[in-house]
Image: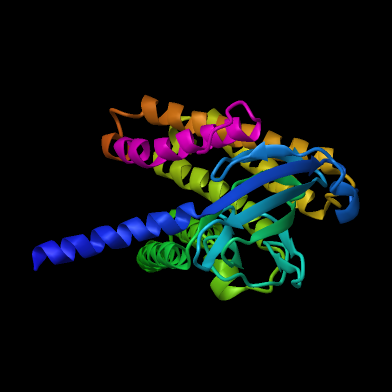
Amino acid sequence: MKTIVVAFFIVLSFLGRAQRSDITCTSVYFVDSSGQYDFLTVKKIAFVNFIEKQVVKVGFNSNATVWVKFIISNNGNLDQTFYLSFPNIHIDSLSFIESGKKPVLLGDRTNQRGLYAISHAYRMKVLPHQTHVVWVKMKKIISFLDFNYELVKEKQLEEKNVRSLIFTTIFIGLIAMLILLNLILFFITKSAIYFSYVLYSLLTIIYLTITTGFAKFYMIPSCVWVSEIRVYSGGFWIILLLYFYKELLQTKVHFPKINKWINGLSWFNITHIVFVFFIPKMEYFEVVQFFWKLGYVVFLFQGVLILYVTMRLFKRQLKISIYICLSFVPHLLWFITYILRSFQVIMHEV
């Protein structure tokens, strides 16, 4: 009996691989940096080859359009149903164009709800010995654009979607418990540090739900401003985190000059975040990009100051210093890597 069961799963595994190998895909892309080419014109332009799961980095752009062409063939004798999947859920818009079918529009800056929270996925069914050509028109303005694609089965996407949903809901539940605890402590002690942590936790929930696709898919699918909410909530999230650490270390008492520096830089970042919010971003793209990158540098400098104070107070405030080292250093390392990636000093995924 055991031998039969093992043989059964071996056959299933073989069939799965055989079916996937029946599909061949050729993919090429072209970056229209001005965003002026139409569908007919772009067909005549030379494209660049790339392969499945290869990350293409376009970088910061003001109004670029990326055109991607897929030639997908079924060389087997069975119908093949799968998804053309783009895992970067923060792309502004993706238009899937296939001959004989109505174009499908997905993306962060659209009011369309996709099939899955963790990917922009386009469903395809290719009959035996047929070839389909799919064009994808992609945009992500005023930000860093990168993308890759996968050909995946429905079951794989569903499993990833469920795992992401479980992780997000558990994390939100844990943060909600911390919010409740700190609210109780705030009402008992009237200390502003607990209230700042409540606000920090709320912003963490906002940032997390948008980053994982939870907000766009389950909560506000018709909202076209989720990217902006993510950026601005992330900025104020860092400001509150730095304030929380500063108050824990009592920098006003031990290092008053550094305390003034941290406060002044925080107010600078608050001012420039609000200022950038009201700038017409397309008309003043270079100004917006300058302020964003300047904000990154300011945040990093504040983080270094917090780390310096922590080291200086390590013996006097041992428990707090250890806590900050364990919780803040990973934040700082992630942020340094993020900055290097934003400036395209490093080009791998983080």
In this rendered view, identify the residue nearer to me: 272 or 243: 272
Instruction: Work out whether residue 313 or residue 344 is closer to the camera in this orientation and state it.
Output: 344
**Is residue 30 left or right of 317 when viewed as pictured?**
right
Residue depicted at x 80% and y 45%:
64
Q: Is residue 50 above or below residue 130?
A: above
Q: Quadrant of residue 75?
A: bottom right
Q: Is residue 326 magenta?
A: yes
Q: Residue at x 52, y 33 (%)?
A: 337
Q: Quadrant of residue 190?
A: bottom left
Residue 315 seen in the figure = yes
Residue 89 visible within the image: no
- Camera-side residue of 245 and 92: 92
Residue name at image x 60 percent, y 50 percent: 25
Quarter of the N terminus within the rendering: bottom left
Q: In this view, does 216 lie to the left or right of 181?
A: right
The colour mode here is rainbow
Rendering coords of residue 111 (x, y %): 71, 72
Horizontal and vertical percent position of residue 107: 68, 62
Question: Which residues fall within the magenta stretch?
Answer: 321-350
State the residue lying farthest toward the left. 1
Residue 307 versus residue 210 in the image, above or below: above
Instruction: Assess whether residue 338 is covered by the magenta stretch.
Output: yes
Taken as a whole, is the magenta stretch helix, strand or loop? Answer: helix
Q: Where is residue 345 in the image (x, y as percent from the top left)?
A: 61, 26
Q: Which of 302 and 203 is in front in this view?
A: 203
Circle count: 0
Q: In which quarter of the image is residue 263?
A: top right
